[in-house]
Image (tube, rainbow, N blue to C red):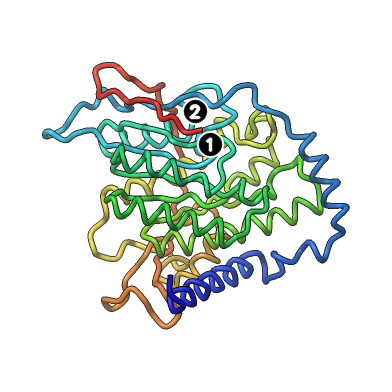
Protein backbone atom coordinates (compact mmCIF):
# COMPACT_ATOMS: atom_id res chain seq x y z
CA UNK A 1 0.00 0.00 0.00
CA UNK A 2 1.54 3.32 -1.02
CA UNK A 3 1.38 6.51 1.08
CA UNK A 4 -1.66 7.84 -0.77
CA UNK A 5 -3.65 4.63 -0.36
CA UNK A 6 -2.56 4.38 3.25
CA UNK A 7 -3.72 7.93 3.92
CA UNK A 8 -7.10 7.25 2.36
CA UNK A 9 -7.55 4.07 4.42
CA UNK A 10 -6.63 5.88 7.66
CA UNK A 11 -9.06 8.65 6.78
CA UNK A 12 -11.83 6.13 6.16
CA UNK A 13 -11.11 4.36 9.45
CA UNK A 14 -11.18 7.70 11.23
CA UNK A 15 -14.59 8.51 9.74
CA UNK A 16 -15.92 5.10 10.73
CA UNK A 17 -14.74 5.63 14.30
CA UNK A 18 -16.30 9.11 14.53
CA UNK A 19 -19.65 7.82 13.31
CA UNK A 20 -19.48 4.82 15.61
CA UNK A 21 -18.80 7.01 18.60
CA UNK A 22 -21.70 9.27 17.62
CA UNK A 23 -23.93 6.21 17.53
CA UNK A 24 -22.94 5.48 21.10
CA UNK A 25 -24.74 8.62 22.23
CA UNK A 26 -22.47 11.47 21.46
CA UNK A 27 -18.97 10.20 21.94
CA UNK A 28 -16.65 8.96 24.59
CA UNK A 29 -17.29 5.29 23.97
CA UNK A 30 -13.63 4.50 23.36
CA UNK A 31 -12.54 6.49 26.41
CA UNK A 32 -15.12 5.27 28.86
CA UNK A 33 -12.61 3.29 30.85
CA UNK A 34 -11.00 6.58 31.82
CA UNK A 35 -14.29 7.78 33.28
CA UNK A 36 -14.99 4.69 35.38
CA UNK A 37 -12.89 2.88 37.94
CA UNK A 38 -11.00 0.15 36.15
CA UNK A 39 -11.10 -2.02 39.25
CA UNK A 40 -14.90 -1.86 39.35
CA UNK A 41 -15.19 -2.95 35.73
CA UNK A 42 -12.71 -5.79 36.14
CA UNK A 43 -14.56 -7.02 39.21
CA UNK A 44 -17.91 -6.87 37.43
CA UNK A 45 -16.49 -8.74 34.45
CA UNK A 46 -15.44 -11.57 36.77
CA UNK A 47 -18.89 -11.66 38.34
CA UNK A 48 -20.53 -11.73 34.92
CA UNK A 49 -18.38 -14.65 33.79
CA UNK A 50 -19.42 -16.61 36.88
CA UNK A 51 -23.09 -15.68 36.44
CA UNK A 52 -23.23 -16.68 32.77
CA UNK A 53 -23.45 -20.44 32.58
CA UNK A 54 -22.53 -22.75 29.77
CA UNK A 55 -24.99 -24.19 27.29
CA UNK A 56 -25.54 -27.91 27.76
CA UNK A 57 -24.21 -28.91 24.34
CA UNK A 58 -22.70 -27.49 21.15
CA UNK A 59 -25.13 -26.01 18.61
CA UNK A 60 -26.96 -28.61 16.49
CA UNK A 61 -25.85 -29.05 12.91
CA UNK A 62 -28.43 -27.42 10.66
CA UNK A 63 -26.89 -28.21 7.26
CA UNK A 64 -29.36 -29.73 4.84
CA UNK A 65 -32.17 -28.97 2.43
CA UNK A 66 -35.23 -26.98 3.46
CA UNK A 67 -38.48 -26.90 1.50
CA UNK A 68 -37.92 -30.26 -0.18
CA UNK A 69 -41.66 -30.60 -0.68
CA UNK A 70 -41.57 -27.62 -3.06
CA UNK A 71 -39.45 -29.30 -5.73
CA UNK A 72 -37.79 -27.51 -8.62
CA UNK A 73 -39.86 -25.00 -10.59
CA UNK A 74 -39.19 -24.56 -14.31
CA UNK A 75 -35.91 -26.37 -14.01
CA UNK A 76 -34.55 -24.04 -11.31
CA UNK A 77 -31.92 -25.50 -9.00
CA UNK A 78 -32.28 -25.11 -5.23
CA UNK A 79 -30.93 -21.90 -3.76
CA UNK A 80 -27.74 -22.17 -1.71
CA UNK A 81 -27.46 -20.27 1.59
CA UNK A 82 -24.26 -19.99 3.64
CA UNK A 83 -24.15 -18.74 7.24
CA UNK A 84 -20.89 -17.32 8.58
CA UNK A 85 -19.98 -15.91 11.96
CA UNK A 86 -19.94 -16.71 15.65
CA UNK A 87 -22.16 -18.53 18.15
CA UNK A 88 -25.14 -16.33 17.28
CA UNK A 89 -24.85 -17.54 13.68
CA UNK A 90 -24.38 -21.17 14.73
CA UNK A 91 -27.39 -21.14 17.05
CA UNK A 92 -25.51 -21.82 20.28
CA UNK A 93 -27.93 -22.51 23.13
CA UNK A 94 -30.73 -24.30 21.26
CA UNK A 95 -31.37 -28.04 21.03
CA UNK A 96 -32.84 -28.68 17.58
CA UNK A 97 -31.51 -27.87 14.10
CA UNK A 98 -34.80 -26.18 13.20
CA UNK A 99 -34.30 -23.64 16.02
CA UNK A 100 -31.01 -22.27 14.67
CA UNK A 101 -30.91 -18.96 12.78
CA UNK A 102 -29.71 -20.70 9.63
CA UNK A 103 -32.62 -23.14 9.63
CA UNK A 104 -35.14 -20.38 10.30
CA UNK A 105 -33.77 -18.29 7.45
CA UNK A 106 -33.51 -21.21 5.03
CA UNK A 107 -37.07 -22.34 5.76
CA UNK A 108 -38.33 -18.77 5.48
CA UNK A 109 -36.63 -18.29 2.12
CA UNK A 110 -38.01 -21.58 0.81
CA UNK A 111 -41.53 -20.58 1.82
CA UNK A 112 -41.32 -17.03 0.49
CA UNK A 113 -39.62 -17.90 -2.80
CA UNK A 114 -41.34 -21.30 -3.33
CA UNK A 115 -38.01 -22.95 -3.93
CA UNK A 116 -35.88 -25.46 -1.97
CA UNK A 117 -32.90 -24.01 -0.10
CA UNK A 118 -29.66 -25.84 0.65
CA UNK A 119 -28.15 -24.53 3.88
CA UNK A 120 -24.54 -24.81 4.96
CA UNK A 121 -23.22 -23.21 8.15
CA UNK A 122 -19.55 -22.27 8.47
CA UNK A 123 -20.13 -20.44 11.77
CA UNK A 124 -17.85 -21.22 14.73
CA UNK A 125 -18.68 -20.70 18.40
CA UNK A 126 -16.39 -18.06 19.87
CA UNK A 127 -15.37 -16.59 16.52
CA UNK A 128 -14.15 -13.01 16.24
CA UNK A 129 -14.14 -11.04 12.99
CA UNK A 130 -10.61 -12.24 12.21
CA UNK A 131 -11.96 -15.81 12.21
CA UNK A 132 -14.11 -15.02 9.18
CA UNK A 133 -11.07 -15.59 6.95
CA UNK A 134 -11.25 -19.42 6.78
CA UNK A 135 -15.05 -19.35 6.84
CA UNK A 136 -15.28 -17.11 3.79
CA UNK A 137 -12.83 -19.27 1.85
CA UNK A 138 -15.01 -22.34 2.49
CA UNK A 139 -18.02 -20.31 1.37
CA UNK A 140 -16.34 -19.10 -1.82
CA UNK A 141 -15.39 -22.67 -2.70
CA UNK A 142 -19.01 -23.77 -2.19
CA UNK A 143 -20.40 -20.85 -4.23
CA UNK A 144 -23.72 -20.09 -2.49
CA UNK A 145 -26.26 -17.66 -3.90
CA UNK A 146 -26.37 -15.77 -0.60
CA UNK A 147 -24.20 -15.50 2.51
CA UNK A 148 -25.42 -14.26 5.88
CA UNK A 149 -22.80 -12.95 8.30
CA UNK A 150 -23.42 -12.55 12.05
CA UNK A 151 -20.32 -11.36 13.92
CA UNK A 152 -19.04 -8.76 16.35
CA UNK A 153 -20.11 -9.70 19.89
CA UNK A 154 -16.86 -11.51 20.69
CA UNK A 155 -14.84 -8.62 19.28
CA UNK A 156 -16.63 -6.39 21.80
CA UNK A 157 -16.23 -8.69 24.79
CA UNK A 158 -12.56 -9.34 23.96
CA UNK A 159 -11.95 -5.65 23.24
CA UNK A 160 -10.62 -6.15 19.72
CA UNK A 161 -9.77 -2.72 18.31
CA UNK A 162 -12.64 -1.40 16.24
CA UNK A 163 -10.64 -0.67 13.04
CA UNK A 164 -9.16 -4.17 13.09
CA UNK A 165 -12.52 -5.89 13.60
CA UNK A 166 -14.37 -4.00 10.89
CA UNK A 167 -11.47 -4.32 8.45
CA UNK A 168 -11.85 -8.12 8.63
CA UNK A 169 -15.59 -7.81 8.04
CA UNK A 170 -15.07 -5.50 5.06
CA UNK A 171 -12.50 -7.87 3.54
CA UNK A 172 -14.93 -10.77 3.95
CA UNK A 173 -17.76 -8.91 2.24
CA UNK A 174 -15.50 -7.86 -0.64
CA UNK A 175 -14.22 -11.42 -1.11
CA UNK A 176 -17.73 -12.84 -1.20
CA UNK A 177 -19.05 -10.14 -3.52
CA UNK A 178 -16.12 -10.60 -5.91
CA UNK A 179 -17.17 -14.25 -6.13
CA UNK A 180 -20.66 -13.18 -7.17
CA UNK A 181 -22.29 -13.98 -3.82
CA UNK A 182 -24.96 -11.71 -2.34
CA UNK A 183 -24.21 -10.76 1.27
CA UNK A 184 -26.41 -9.71 4.20
CA UNK A 185 -24.76 -8.72 7.48
CA UNK A 186 -26.60 -8.75 10.79
CA UNK A 187 -24.72 -6.14 12.81
CA UNK A 188 -23.55 -6.55 16.39
CA UNK A 189 -26.39 -6.89 18.91
CA UNK A 190 -26.70 -4.59 21.90
CA UNK A 191 -24.88 -6.47 24.66
CA UNK A 192 -26.39 -4.12 27.20
CA UNK A 193 -29.45 -6.40 27.20
CA UNK A 194 -27.47 -9.19 28.91
CA UNK A 195 -28.72 -9.16 32.51
CA UNK A 196 -25.88 -11.13 34.16
CA UNK A 197 -23.65 -8.19 33.23
CA UNK A 198 -24.10 -5.65 36.00
CA UNK A 199 -23.91 -1.87 35.95
CA UNK A 200 -21.82 0.09 35.12
CA UNK A 201 -20.18 -2.62 32.96
CA UNK A 202 -23.45 -3.25 31.10
CA UNK A 203 -23.60 0.45 30.19
CA UNK A 204 -20.02 0.29 28.88
CA UNK A 205 -20.52 -2.80 26.72
CA UNK A 206 -23.74 -1.31 25.40
CA UNK A 207 -21.80 1.65 24.07
CA UNK A 208 -19.03 -0.56 22.72
CA UNK A 209 -21.50 -2.80 20.89
CA UNK A 210 -23.31 0.21 19.39
CA UNK A 211 -20.00 1.57 18.14
CA UNK A 212 -19.27 -1.81 16.57
CA UNK A 213 -22.69 -2.00 14.89
CA UNK A 214 -22.43 1.48 13.36
CA UNK A 215 -18.92 0.84 12.06
CA UNK A 216 -19.96 -2.55 10.66
CA UNK A 217 -22.84 -0.90 8.80
CA UNK A 218 -20.53 1.60 7.11
CA UNK A 219 -17.82 -0.82 5.99
CA UNK A 220 -20.20 -3.61 4.98
CA UNK A 221 -22.38 -1.37 2.79
CA UNK A 222 -19.30 0.24 1.25
CA UNK A 223 -18.03 -3.25 0.41
CA UNK A 224 -21.30 -4.22 -1.28
CA UNK A 225 -23.42 -5.87 1.43
CA UNK A 226 -26.81 -5.00 2.88
CA UNK A 227 -26.99 -4.74 6.67
CA UNK A 228 -29.74 -5.34 9.21
CA UNK A 229 -29.45 -3.83 12.67
CA UNK A 230 -30.12 -6.35 15.44
CA UNK A 231 -29.36 -3.88 18.22
CA UNK A 232 -31.74 -4.22 21.16
CA UNK A 233 -34.32 -6.08 19.04
CA UNK A 234 -34.87 -8.52 21.87
CA UNK A 235 -34.20 -6.15 24.75
CA UNK A 236 -37.75 -5.51 26.01
CA UNK A 237 -38.73 -9.16 25.60
CA UNK A 238 -35.56 -10.29 27.38
CA UNK A 239 -36.27 -7.97 30.29
CA UNK A 240 -39.90 -9.12 30.56
CA UNK A 241 -39.32 -12.86 30.14
CA UNK A 242 -35.63 -13.80 30.50
CA UNK A 243 -36.56 -17.42 31.25
CA UNK A 244 -38.05 -17.82 27.75
CA UNK A 245 -35.95 -15.44 25.65
CA UNK A 246 -32.54 -16.57 26.96
CA UNK A 247 -31.04 -20.03 26.61
CA UNK A 248 -29.79 -21.91 29.66
CA UNK A 249 -26.48 -20.02 29.70
CA UNK A 250 -28.35 -16.71 30.27
CA UNK A 251 -26.24 -15.09 27.55
CA UNK A 252 -27.28 -16.50 24.17
CA UNK A 253 -30.85 -16.25 22.84
CA UNK A 254 -33.33 -19.07 23.17
CA UNK A 255 -35.21 -20.52 20.20
CA UNK A 256 -37.70 -17.66 20.51
CA UNK A 257 -34.89 -15.14 20.57
CA UNK A 258 -33.29 -16.53 17.42
CA UNK A 259 -36.69 -16.58 15.73
CA UNK A 260 -37.13 -12.87 16.40
CA UNK A 261 -33.72 -12.09 14.89
CA UNK A 262 -34.40 -14.28 11.85
CA UNK A 263 -37.76 -12.58 11.32
CA UNK A 264 -36.06 -9.19 11.23
CA UNK A 265 -33.55 -10.38 8.62
CA UNK A 266 -35.75 -12.50 6.34
CA UNK A 267 -37.25 -9.66 4.21
CA UNK A 268 -33.74 -8.39 3.48
CA UNK A 269 -32.61 -11.86 2.37
CA UNK A 270 -35.58 -12.12 0.02
CA UNK A 271 -34.78 -8.70 -1.45
CA UNK A 272 -31.11 -9.63 -1.89
CA UNK A 273 -32.06 -12.67 -3.98
CA UNK A 274 -34.94 -11.01 -5.84
CA UNK A 275 -34.34 -7.26 -6.01
CA UNK A 276 -37.40 -5.07 -6.38
CA UNK A 277 -37.82 -3.06 -9.59
CA UNK A 278 -35.93 0.21 -9.84
CA UNK A 279 -39.06 2.13 -8.88
CA UNK A 280 -38.85 3.65 -5.40
CA UNK A 281 -40.52 1.35 -2.84
CA UNK A 282 -43.22 2.64 -0.54
CA UNK A 283 -41.40 4.26 2.39
CA UNK A 284 -42.61 5.78 5.62
CA UNK A 285 -41.66 9.27 6.75
CA UNK A 286 -38.67 8.08 8.77
CA UNK A 287 -37.29 5.91 5.96
CA UNK A 288 -35.52 6.86 2.73
CA UNK A 289 -32.14 7.89 1.35
CA UNK A 290 -29.45 9.22 3.68
CA UNK A 291 -25.72 9.53 3.69
CA UNK A 292 -24.31 6.17 4.74
CA UNK A 293 -22.91 7.70 7.92
CA UNK A 294 -26.32 9.06 8.94
CA UNK A 295 -28.04 5.80 8.03
CA UNK A 296 -25.59 3.88 10.22
CA UNK A 297 -26.37 6.06 13.23
CA UNK A 298 -30.14 5.78 12.69
CA UNK A 299 -29.93 2.00 12.20
CA UNK A 300 -28.21 1.57 15.56
CA UNK A 301 -31.07 3.46 17.20
CA UNK A 302 -33.77 1.18 15.75
CA UNK A 303 -33.37 -2.57 15.59
CA UNK A 304 -34.64 -4.31 12.47
CA UNK A 305 -33.43 -1.48 10.21
CA UNK A 306 -32.02 -2.37 6.80
CA UNK A 307 -29.28 -0.28 5.20
CA UNK A 308 -28.23 -0.80 1.58
CA UNK A 309 -26.35 1.26 -0.97
CA UNK A 310 -28.38 3.71 -3.06
CA UNK A 311 -27.97 6.05 -6.02
CA UNK A 312 -29.12 9.66 -6.24
CA UNK A 313 -29.23 11.32 -9.66
CA UNK A 314 -27.23 8.42 -11.04
CA UNK A 315 -24.45 8.81 -8.46
CA UNK A 316 -23.36 6.52 -5.63
CA UNK A 317 -21.79 9.32 -3.62
CA UNK A 318 -22.92 12.74 -2.45
CA UNK A 319 -21.37 15.62 -0.47
CA UNK A 320 -21.35 13.51 2.73
CA UNK A 321 -20.07 10.32 1.10
CA UNK A 322 -21.83 7.11 0.05
CA UNK A 323 -25.62 7.25 -0.37
CA UNK A 324 -27.66 4.63 1.46
CA UNK A 325 -31.32 3.68 1.71
CA UNK A 326 -32.75 3.02 5.15
CA UNK A 327 -35.83 0.81 5.68
CA UNK A 328 -37.47 -0.76 8.73
CA UNK A 329 -37.90 -4.48 8.14
CA UNK A 330 -39.14 -6.14 11.34
CA UNK A 331 -41.49 -9.06 10.65
CA UNK A 332 -42.86 -12.07 12.52
CA UNK A 333 -42.21 -15.75 11.87
CA UNK A 334 -45.40 -17.67 12.58
CA UNK A 335 -44.15 -21.22 12.08
CA UNK A 336 -40.95 -23.06 12.82
CA UNK A 337 -39.40 -25.18 10.07
CA UNK A 338 -38.99 -28.90 10.12
CA UNK A 339 -35.52 -30.22 10.77
CA UNK A 340 -33.42 -30.33 7.57
CA UNK A 341 -33.95 -33.12 5.06
CA UNK A 342 -30.88 -34.67 3.50
CA UNK A 343 -32.51 -37.44 1.48
CA UNK A 344 -33.53 -37.17 -2.17
CA UNK A 345 -31.50 -33.99 -2.50
CA UNK A 346 -28.03 -32.73 -3.23
CA UNK A 347 -25.92 -33.87 -0.28
CA UNK A 348 -24.38 -31.16 1.88
CA UNK A 349 -21.10 -32.07 3.50
CA UNK A 350 -20.44 -30.50 6.91
CA UNK A 351 -17.79 -27.83 7.00
CA UNK A 352 -14.71 -28.36 9.13
CA UNK A 353 -13.54 -25.05 10.54
CA UNK A 354 -11.77 -25.09 13.89
Q: Is mark 2 on a helix, strand or loop?
A: helix
User: At 29% across and 16% down in the image, what residue appears?
Assistant: 343
Instruction: Look at the image and tell me in which quarter the N terminus lies.
Output: bottom left
Helix, strand or loop at label 1? It is helix
Give the vertical position of 210 relative to 42 (above or below): below
The residue nearer to you, when weighing 99 against 131, is 131
Count of all numbered marks drawn on residues in the image:
2
**Residue at the outermost left position:** 74
Residue 262: x and y, percent?
47, 40
Which residue is denoted by mark 1 in the rendering? 258
- Give the side of residue 66 with respect to residue 195, left or right: left
Residue 105 is marked as none
Q: Does 136 sit above or below residue 321?
A: above
Quarter holding residue 351: top left
Residue beneath disc 2? 99
Q: Which of 30 and 209 is in front in this view?
A: 30
Q: Which residue is drawn at 67% across and 67% down?
A: 25
Tell me, yes or no, whether the two marked residues, 1 and 2, touch with CB atoms within 8 Å: yes
Give x and y (percent) for residue 83: 42, 39
From this view, report whether residue 151 is shown above or below residue 58. below
Seen from the viewer's position, the closer of residues 129 and 182 is 129
Label 1, label 2: how far apart the Cα atoms are: 7 Å
Q: Residue 216: image x %, image y %?
A: 51, 58
Pointer 2 local density, CA inside 10 Å: few below 14, some 14–19, many at least 20: many
Residue reaching furthest top? 343
The reply, left or right, for residue 257 in relation to residue 181 is right
Badge 1 local density, few (<14 within 10 Å), some, or many (20+)? many
Residue 146 falls in image quadrant: top left
Q: Which residue is drawn at 34% across and 20% down?
A: 341
Amino acid sequence: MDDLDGGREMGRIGRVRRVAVAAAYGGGGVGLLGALAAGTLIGQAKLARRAIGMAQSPPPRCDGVYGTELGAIDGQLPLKLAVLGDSSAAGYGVDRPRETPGALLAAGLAERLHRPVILRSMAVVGAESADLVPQREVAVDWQPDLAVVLIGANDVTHRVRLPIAVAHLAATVRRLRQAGIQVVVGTCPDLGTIRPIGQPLRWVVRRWSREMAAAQTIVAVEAGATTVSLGDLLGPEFAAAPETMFSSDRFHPSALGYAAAAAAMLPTLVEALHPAPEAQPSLSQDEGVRSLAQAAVEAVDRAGTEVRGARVAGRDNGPAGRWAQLRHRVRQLTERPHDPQTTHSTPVQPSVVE
